[in-house]
Amino acid sequence: MSAHLNAALREGDNPELTEERRKATFDTRKLADEFFGSHLARRRREIAKAIDAIPELHDTKPLPFMTREEKVEEAARKVFTLSKHITDIVDLSNNRETQSLNEMVIGIEGMPISLHFAMFIPALQGQADDEQKREWLDRAIRMEIIGTYAQTELGHGTNLRMLETTATYDKQNKEFILNSPTLTSLKWWPGNMGKSCNYAIVVANLIIDDKLLGPHSFMVQLRDENSHETMPNIQIGDIGPKMAYNSSDNGFLKLSNLRIPRRNMLMKHAKVQEDGTYKKPPHEKLAYSAMVHVRSHMITQHAMLLAYALSISTRYSCIRRQGYIDPKKDEVKVIEYQTQQHRLFPHIARAYAFAFAGTESIRKFEIMKRSLEAGNIELIADLHALTSGLKAVVTYLAGQGIEQARQACGGHGYSMASYMGEIYGVGIAGCTYEGENLVMMQQLGRYLIKAVKSVKEGKKPTGYVAYLAHAGQRHSLIDCRPNEGYAEHIRAFEHIARRQTFRAAERLQKYENSGLSTEQAWNNCTVELNRASRLHTRLFIACNFYERVLDVEDMAVREVLEDLLHLHLNYELIDIASYALEAKKIRPNAVSLVDSWEITDREHRSVLGRRDGHVYENLFKWAKSSDLNQNDVLPSHKKHLLPMMLNARKQSKL
Ligand SMILES: CCCCCCC/C=C/C(=O)SCCNC(=O)CCNC(=O)[C@H](O)C(C)(C)COP(=O)(O)OP(=O)(O)OC[C@H]1O[C@@H](n2cnc3c(N)ncnc32)[C@H](O)[C@@H]1OP(=O)(O)O
Ligand SMILES: Cc1cc2nc3c(=O)[nH]c(=O)nc-3n(C[C@H](O)[C@H](O)[C@H](O)COP(=O)(O)OP(=O)(O)OC[C@H]3O[C@@H](n4cnc5c(N)ncnc54)[C@H](O)[C@@H]3O)c2cc1C
């Protein structure tokens, strides 16, 4: 077959798809270069080819046919195998190369070192001082140890100020005593903590001389480095099966007055001297750096999950023939139906828009990280606002798109043969982890309210909120270059976003003027404020997409991206125009309304939905019955991960 624009053309393909691919008006590799960046696009092709040549990196059998324990073992086996080949395949210092390798080999269901790379290493990089980096970071990078990030507790995940785990400084012995004082203080959810990790960065409330100093990070050894058996004063285990992502052993951790050396508190920013003197960090939220790191990188990951679902669904829609448009002709491909196109194409546009926004988010994170290393903390607030909004909007809309893609596949979309269920389950997990979406939207809301206040004081805010100062003027969010084709869309978008932000600010002011406390006034406005945050973020995504398309040099690729941009802007404007929902008087009757359905606990099968409300004690009981907890050390750990770490330690001693 002659070389063609569409590099996916292959002899022996389903002719239905070949027919589609022959319609391409652009070179797919050139578009891939725009989607991933040309270097990463090329490297992904090279990585995929390298993996093809290593059968032991391929799935032993389709993951949906595996039990939970088999999934955990499969992931461990692949990690061990990868450790023998990885430096031949990727540049370990390139986050997106290693991410691509993991997605191709391990897949999306998690692996024993997910959190090791996603948070444990970034937290050490951001919060350990130089001596601590030499002691732990180098070993973590060499895979001599495996870590996680243990912050969330059974009773608190969102509200970090109420975390209950304590770290009390004992001046006498120059140690911290870590303790889980209550059932709700048990660490709960941290990825790979149940059975895989031997270290964790534990976020605990620092206490010195009975004074509570808030959340700080502590390096804790969970398991013996050689036997992998649980350390004394620690109870640890898997929390049980989840909606998806079941190759990961998310765990629980109970600390019983565990003593660790003073130097196990990460002290790049906050410090505790031997005599108990406490030195505050230059910015209270530097301790939250690992979360901002993950949020900055989640955007491209969720764009990719949406792309997975849409590539499955769009290809399938071109081979599935069902029904007629003209009854005198053959059954049509379901892609021909306008409803099917409307179900898929706007989400294809979003996948590109989200990927471009994610590249910008990572770029901004790297700029903030460099400026932080130079001692400048000014960019922290801007990045927190940007990533809070992007994480909340992209994970939610990507989840919606994945579900639409599944539905577009009809019955076979409901079979795990489509893999859609897992893609959806992993996708929507992002709406919860790294900060529940509605809460993170409020973080951006705070930032927007401050911007409105500065506009009202006659100041001109800059950056992504500059448009708030330009009511009626022809100005765009991020200096969109004048291009009549789309600038009007952008300005309409800005107008809607600006109007909503000012509406929320005025409502907040009205409640405050009425004598309500700031907190009550805020709570009464959070729906309006979240709308403003959502619109602000979608405006950013649209503008970033617009700017990105204008940079494309290949005219054929630029033309198809402009088609997607046009669709995206129109779809977004229609979608946001429907912002009008109020629900007021339900609150007092909420529980009685659901009680009236008289669904029994047996029917619910849900610990959270118990009629008696005794959730926490029953969650712990449920978790302890997990099959992964029948042994302290998994057989698969002894077979794969322990040898891997022992090898790594031997290597580093050579
Ligand atoms: C399926 C694939 C899996 C892949 C891996 C999954 C890994 C998942 C890991 C996790 O989930 S780790 C745990 C994540 N947990 C969270 O994200 C918790 C979310 N909650 C918070 O971050 C905080 O509680 C909060 C919501 C930000 C509130 O914090 P706090 O009460 O301390 O602050 P506020 O009073 O709201 O704001 C005060 C002030 O601080 C600013 N600020 C808050 N956070 C940050 C930050 N990270 N960086 C910079 N600045 C921050 C905030 O904007 C306020 O500023 P002002 O408005 O006062 O100027
Ligand atoms: C797949 C997965 C992996 C995870 N991995 C880790 C990990 O590795 N390490 C770790 O530490 N944690 C991890 N977590 C935990 C995760 O970070 C928390 O679940 C998340 O931060 C949400 O907190 P929560 O569970 O307390 O939700 P809650 O806050 O209890 O949310 C329940 C409801 O309350 C609402 N709500 C709460 N506070 C407010 C507010 N102030 N205003 C308005 N509404 C509010 C929320 O919007 C939500 O609707 C993981 C979770 C998942 C699902």
Image (tube, rainbow, N blue to C red):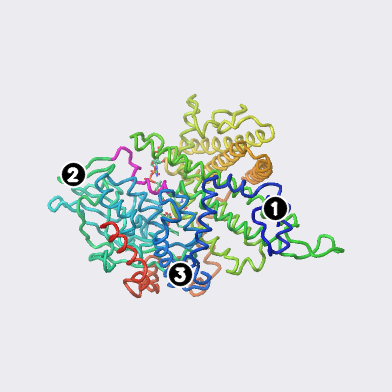
Q: Over which residues does the magenta segment extend?
A: 281-293
Q: Is residue 499 left or right of residue 562?
A: left
Secondary structure mostly seen in the magenta stretch? helix
Amino acid type shown at disc 3: Lys
Q: Which mark is residue 74?
A: none
Kindly report the distance in space between the C-alpha atoms of the residues bearing marks 2 and 1: 62 Å
Q: Is residue 360 found inside the magenta-colored segment of the image? A: no
Q: Amino acid at mark 2?
A: Gln
Residue 273 is tagged as 2
Which mark's residue is nearer the viewer, 1 or 3? Answer: 3
Q: Residue furthest top?
A: 458
Q: CA distance from mark 2 to mark 3?
A: 45 Å
Q: Which residue is mark 1?
A: 342
SS of the residue at dot 1? helix
Q: Quadrant of the N terminus?
A: bottom right
Extreme-left residue of the structure: 172
Question: Are the residues flagged by discs 1 and 3 in contact, CB closer than 8 Å?
Answer: no
Q: Is residue 28 above or below residue 489?
A: below
**Sequence order check, earlier mark of 1 and 3:** 3
Residue 357 percent coordinates (x, y):
54, 43
Q: Quadrant of residue 259?
A: bottom left
User: To which residue does mark 3 refer?
Assistant: 71
Using the rendered image of the protein, determine whether residue 577 is visible from the camera's viewpoint.
no
Between discs 2 and 1, the one toward the N terminus:
2
**Label 1 near ligand 1 (CB < 8 Å):** no
From where the camera sits, is residue 16 visible?
yes
Q: Residue at x 47, y 58 (%)?
A: 102
Residue 317: quadrant of the picture: bottom right
Question: Badges 2 and 3: C-beta atoms under 8 Å apart?
Answer: no
